[in-house]
């Protein structure tokens, strides 16, 4: 087992190296220019980077419910936040103080995956099994739905059975759902389980399971989903660290955000994101070092960094649930929506769009049948009335224009199209943009951040 884990870890680091080596080989920039620019970023301290709006980093306590975490992220208009352990408030070590970073998208992906598990369980059950009283389901958990083994032990009862309980409550109230109907209508019930406590106000729970524990099992805390659904490790840097290290973490090492701490203090002082860095680059327009690179066509910089065959996309008639699952499987933040056979781009689905499935219950109630195009059109009808066109560029577009559009639109990717039919041939992400301006000096992390950094990146 240890040998298998070592192979997995080495493979992960190798993928980072392969990505960056590919970029460096394709960039048509003088080596002297890259060295000068990299040295400049190495001389800039993290403490000089602008603070987050309001000057205070939004944090979420580990014992916050999933529902409340969603509300915090939504109301603060942020996609992620550090998670603080309330049990170690007196610790002066950030390793004890923080458990990681919870991502808005990860929370909702957990909701969808859990709901899908429950749908499978309900679909496989008989009308009698689906209509079992909530108390019975609470007492025997996943076994009531015929789910046994590691899946049940791992916590199916914490979410999937939670939705099944909602189905059970509906039956108790006289709605008469059978297994298939309950599965098709699961979204509506699961929405209530996750974001409301109404189903539990009139639920009779088995005496063998205290009501408080039963409700907590159905409404899990942030700490319970943090590890399984996180996208990247928690890796803060010191205010005395160089911006080069931060830029490498946000590009080569695939972090979306980097918390900043002060030496000897456990609290997070700043929170640097890919978006904030690209917006900062946009403000450098007109400076000699920026223009030497950014005024070149993206094709001269080797962009996009992936071949057309490597692009992950989705078609409009596919299910929206499949789109979000594809994002999670490939660890990407968005997909172009295309029309066959030439992959004409007609839209874009971003991981942050998944929030509409919770903010708009009418969408979530039939998410198992909702297509990508229906999803986009329904969102559009609530806002502009038209499907928002995807952000695109051509191979002869300058990097500066790409950066400007990314910053202006506050988006994380821009699609590269070709021909009159706007066939999508690639994508440029925030990670790619940052990678254009730097390279990694030999042994940089070992010399500046230590061996422990790569250990954390392997988690």
Image: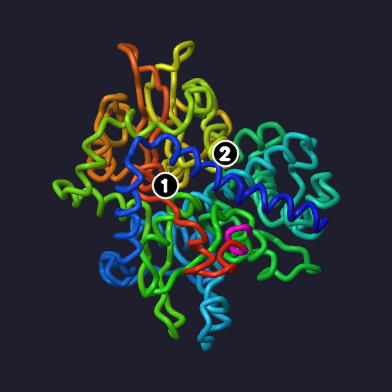
The colouring scheme, among rainbow, by chain, secondary structure or one colour, is rainbow
Q: Which residues are magenta?
A: 455-459
Mark 2–mark 1 Cα distance, whole angstroms, equals 25 Å
In percent of width and height, residue 283 lies at 19, 51
Callout 1: helix, strand or loop? helix
Q: Is residue 114 left or right of residue 131?
A: left
The quarter of the rendered structure image containing the C terminus is bottom right
Q: Residue at x 37, y 75 (%)?
A: 240
- The one nearer the camera, 285 or 315, is 285
Q: Which residue is mark 2?
A: 330
Give the residue furthest to the front: 32
Q: Secondary structure at mark 2?
A: helix
User: Eyeballing the image, is 27 above or below 285?
Assistant: above
Is 62 magenta? The answer is no
Location of residue 16 in the rendering, given as x and y in whole percent from the top left corner? 55, 47
Residue at image mark 1? 359
Residue 173 in view of the camera: no
Residue 257 is situated, as x and y percent measured from the top left of the image, at: 43, 58
Q: Residue at x 72, y 37 (%)?
A: 120
Query: Which corner quadrant of the image does residue 258 belong to?
Result: bottom left
> Image quadrant for the N terminus?
bottom right
The residue most toward the left is 286
Residue displayed at 41% across by 46% down: 431
Whichever of labels 2 and 1 marks the residue nearer the N terminus, that label is 2
């Amino acid at each position: 087992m240890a040998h298998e884990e070592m192979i997995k870890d080495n493979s992960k680091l190798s993928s980072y190296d392969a990505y960056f080596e590919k970029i460096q080989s394709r960039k048509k920039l003088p080596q002297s220019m890259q060295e000068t620019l990299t040295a400049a970023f190495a001389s800039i301290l993290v403490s000089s980077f602008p603070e987050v709006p309001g000057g205070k980093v939004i944090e979420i306590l580990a014992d916050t419910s999933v529902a409340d975490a969603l509300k915090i992220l939504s109301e603060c208009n942020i996609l992620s936040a550090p998670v603080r352990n309330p049990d170690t408030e007196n610790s002066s070590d950030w390793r004890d103080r923080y458990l990681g970073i919870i991502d808005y998208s990860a929370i909702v992906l957990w909701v969808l995956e859990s709901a899908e598990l429950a749908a499978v369980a309900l679909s496989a059950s008989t009308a009698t099994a689906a209509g079992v009283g909530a108390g019975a389901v609470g007492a025997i958990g996943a076994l009531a739905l015929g789910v046994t083994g590691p899946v049940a032990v791992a916590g199916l009862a914490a979410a999937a059975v939670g939705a099944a309980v909602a189905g059970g409550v509906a039956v108790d109230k006289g709605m008469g759902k059978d297994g298939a109907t309950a599965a098709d209508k699961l979204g509506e019930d699961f929405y209530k389980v996750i974001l409301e406590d109404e189903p539990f106000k009139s639920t009779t729970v088995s005496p063998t399971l205290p009501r408080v524990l039963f409700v907590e099992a159905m409404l899990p805390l942030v700490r319970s989903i943090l590890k399984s659904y996180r996208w990247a490790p928690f890796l803060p840097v010191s205010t005395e660290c160089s911006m080069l290290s931060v830029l490498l973490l946000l590009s080569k090492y695939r972090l979306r955000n980097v918390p900043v701490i002060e030496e000897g203090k456990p609290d997070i002082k700043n929170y640097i994101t890919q978006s904030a860095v690209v917006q900062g680059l946009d403000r450098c327009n007109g400076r000699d070092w920026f223009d030497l690179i950014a005024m070149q066509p993206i094709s001269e910089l080797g962009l996009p960094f992936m071949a057309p065959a490597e692009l992950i996309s989705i078609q409009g008639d596919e299910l929206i649930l499949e789109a979000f699952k594809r994002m999670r499987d490939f660890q990407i933040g968005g997909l172009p929506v295309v029309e066959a056979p030439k992959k004409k781009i007609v839209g874009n689905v971003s991981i942050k769009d998944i929030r509409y499935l919770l903010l708009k219950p009418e969408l979530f109630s039939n998410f198992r049948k909702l297509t990508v195009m229906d999803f986009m059109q329904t969102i559009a009808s609530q806002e502009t009335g038209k499907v928002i066109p995807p952000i695109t560029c051509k191979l002869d577009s300058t990097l500066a224009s790409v950066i400007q559009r990314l910053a202006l639109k506050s988006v994380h990717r821009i699609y590269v199209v070709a021909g009159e039919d706007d066939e999508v041939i690639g994508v440029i992400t925030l990670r790619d943009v940052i990678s254009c301006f730097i390279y990694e000096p030999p042994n940089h992390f070992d010399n500046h951040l230590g061996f422990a950094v790569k250990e954390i990146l392997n988690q």
